[in-house]
Image (spheres, rainbow, N blue to C red):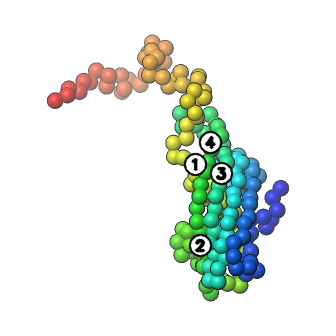
Amino acid sequence: MEKENEFLIPVSGLALGVHSFKFDIQDEFFAGLEYSEVKQGAVTVDLEVVREELMMTLNFHLEGKVLVPCDRCADEFYIPIQNEQVFYIKFGTEEVEESEDVAVVPAEEHAYDVRSLIYEYIILAIPIHRVHPEGECNPQVLALLSHDEEPAEEKGVETDPRWAALKDVKIEDN
């Protein structure tokens, strides 16, 4: 079970200078997020916080693996991820999100929760094309998808007559 304040970074009580935080993200982290695309994973987050007079710079380094479905065979597999992101916290009079990588918080704010940033950076680290390493896809699914196999009619699979009419259409190259 996660500690309630595990992802809170001190703001007002943090001394000027560089501070390091480390988070070990496990399955419980993703289970606590209702609409999470990822349900399982193991990611290490190293966070370096540079506290200055009027702002804080948060340097995130993430490395690990998450469970995702393969785009080719739909079986789940662990894909390695790595990401580096920078987030800025400025001190102001009220809490405002200036942009996707800058937030303004009151200088007297006690802590800043980085849980949502960590989740966002994990999701951003997942490649768009998610495919098993070569030779690890489900062979049964690949056999069904193979273009080298006999046509559906020869397998006893009935085809939609609308598509059957199109197989006689020929396109000539100019």
Where the C terminus falls, by quadrant? top left
Q: Residue at x 52, y 23 (%)?
A: 144
Disc on the earlier residue, 2 or 1: 2
Image height of 97 relative to 66, above or below: below
Which type of secondary structure does the marked residue at label 3 adopt? strand
Determine whether label 3 and label 1 are within 8 Å by CB.
Answer: no
- Marks 4 and 3, how far apart at CA: 11 Å
Disc on the earlier residue, 2 or 4: 4
Percent position of residue 129, x then y: 51, 42
Q: Residue at x 26, y 24 (%)?
A: 169
Determine if residue 39 is in view.
Answer: no
Q: Which residue is mark 1?
A: 126
Q: Which residue is mark 4?
A: 79
Image height of 56 relative to 107, above or below: above
Q: Which residue is mark 2?
A: 88
Density class for disc 1 (Cα within 10 Å; few <14, some 14-19, many ≥20) is some
Density class for disc 4 (Cα within 10 Å; few <14, some 14-19, many ≥20) is some
Amino acid under disc 2: Tyr
- Marks 2 and 1, how far apart at CA: 23 Å
Image height of 144 relative to 22, above or below: above
Amino acid under disc 3: Glu
Q: Which residue is mark 3?
A: 63
Density class for disc 2 (Cα within 10 Å; few <14, some 14-19, many ≥20) is some
Density class for disc 3 (Cα within 10 Å; few <14, some 14-19, many ≥20) is some
Disc on the earlier residue, 4 or 3: 3
- Marks 3 and 1, how far apart at CA: 11 Å
Which type of secondary structure does the marked residue at label 1 adopt? loop
Which type of secondary structure does the marked residue at label 4 adopt? strand
